[in-house]
């Protein structure tokens, strides 16, 4: 997968963070780009708000230096291409490798990953009893820069990267062409990042208990798939959440 365009946009995002350093928290930030499973055939793209801790971080002040921006981008690219030392050939296999992990991050304790797994099973994209189920999806996030220590970017950190994150998301979708796209983010987080030329909302869509927006994905005038914006699944009835998402995508 050629990441030249993604790298350029991520570099601009990191540069913008550096330029705004005096208005941001001084703690290190980490970065992210979309992660594509080796068995992905366009069936499902799963999008969160921001990565919850990931790679080595740089402080916003450090990102004022072009050499640090270049190192930041290189580190991020390696982390999403299977070169990060997580012990898996397929970049997405880390999800199943960490399923039930007792020593560090446990993906089975994450509602985000539990609902992804159940949705893949319900849509019959893959056998979720097999360890390679994450290899059939793409994972991305709305915001590409977040605190190294974890959690989502605050208002100012989100603001300085929003425009370029919107551009990068549109590029990802154009390149990956998902038939189904789930924003497990909540409509408040997705607001301002869903380009109206790409996401054509269904005016007749009735919001469910957890689903908020739905419609078609349009690239260069062609409908390539469907999307759904749902509340973040943490603390929700996951059976209902998955059922509503599946219904919107079926």
Image (cartoon, helix red, strand yellow):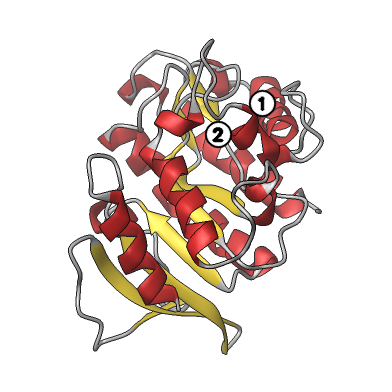
Query: Who comes first in sequence, dot 2 or dot 1?
Result: 2
Location of the C terminus (image quadrant): bottom left
In front: 237, or 24? 237
Picture quadrant of residue 27:
top left
Query: Callout 1: few (<14), some (14-19), or many (20+) C-alpha neighbours within 10 Å?
Result: some
In the image, taking residue 142 as reference, residue 155 lies left or right, namely left
- Residue 150 percent location from the top left of the image: 41, 22
Image coordinates of residue 223 in percent, x first then y, are 55, 86
Residue at screen point 46% across, 32% down = 108
| Residue 68 position within the rendered picture, expressed as x and y whole percent measured from the top left | 65, 20
Kindly give the residue lying farthest to the top in the view shown: 103
Q: Residue furthest front?
A: 129
Residue occupying image coordinates x 57% and y 49%: 139
Asked whether disc 2 touches disc 1, contact meaning CB atoms under 8 Å apart, the reply is yes
State the residue at coordinates (40%, 29%). Answer: 109
Q: Which residue is mark 2?
A: 15
In the depicted structure, whether residue 136 falls above or below residue 14: below
Q: Residue drawn 30% across and 47% down? A: 233
Label 2 SS: helix
Q: Is residue 192 visible?
A: no
Q: Label 1 belongs to which residue?
A: 66
């Amino acid at each position: 997968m050629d990441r030249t365009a993604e790298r350029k946009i991520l570099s601009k995002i990191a540069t913008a963070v550096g330029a705004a350093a005096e208005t941001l928290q001084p703690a290190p930030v980490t970065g992210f780009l979309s992660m594509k499973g080796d068995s992905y055939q366009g069936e499902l793209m799963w999008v969160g708000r921001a990565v919850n801790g990931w790679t080595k971080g740089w402080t916003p002040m450090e990102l004022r230096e072009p050499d640090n921006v270049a190192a930041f981008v290189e580190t991020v690219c390696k982390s999403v291409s299977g070169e990060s030392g997580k012990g898996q050939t397929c970049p997405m296999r880390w999800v199943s490798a960490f399923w039930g992990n007792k020593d560090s991050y446990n993906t089975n304790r994450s509602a985000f990953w539990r609902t992804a797994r159940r949705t893949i099973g319900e849509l019959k994209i893959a056998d979720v009893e097999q360890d390679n189920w994450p290899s059939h999806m793409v994972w991305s996030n709305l915001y590409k820069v977040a605190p190294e220590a974890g959690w989502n970017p605050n208002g100012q950190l989100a603001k300085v990267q929003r425009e370029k994150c919107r551009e990068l998301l549109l590029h990802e979708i154009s390149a990956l062409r998902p038939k189904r796209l789930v924003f497990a983010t909540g409509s408040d987080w997705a607001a301002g990042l869903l380009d109206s030329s790409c996401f054509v909302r269904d005016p007749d869509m009735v919001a469910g208990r957890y689903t908020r927006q739905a419609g078609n994905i349009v690239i260069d005038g062609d409908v390539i798939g469907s999307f759904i914006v749902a509340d973040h699944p943490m603390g929700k009835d996951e059976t209902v959440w998955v059922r509503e998402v599946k219904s919107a995508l079926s």
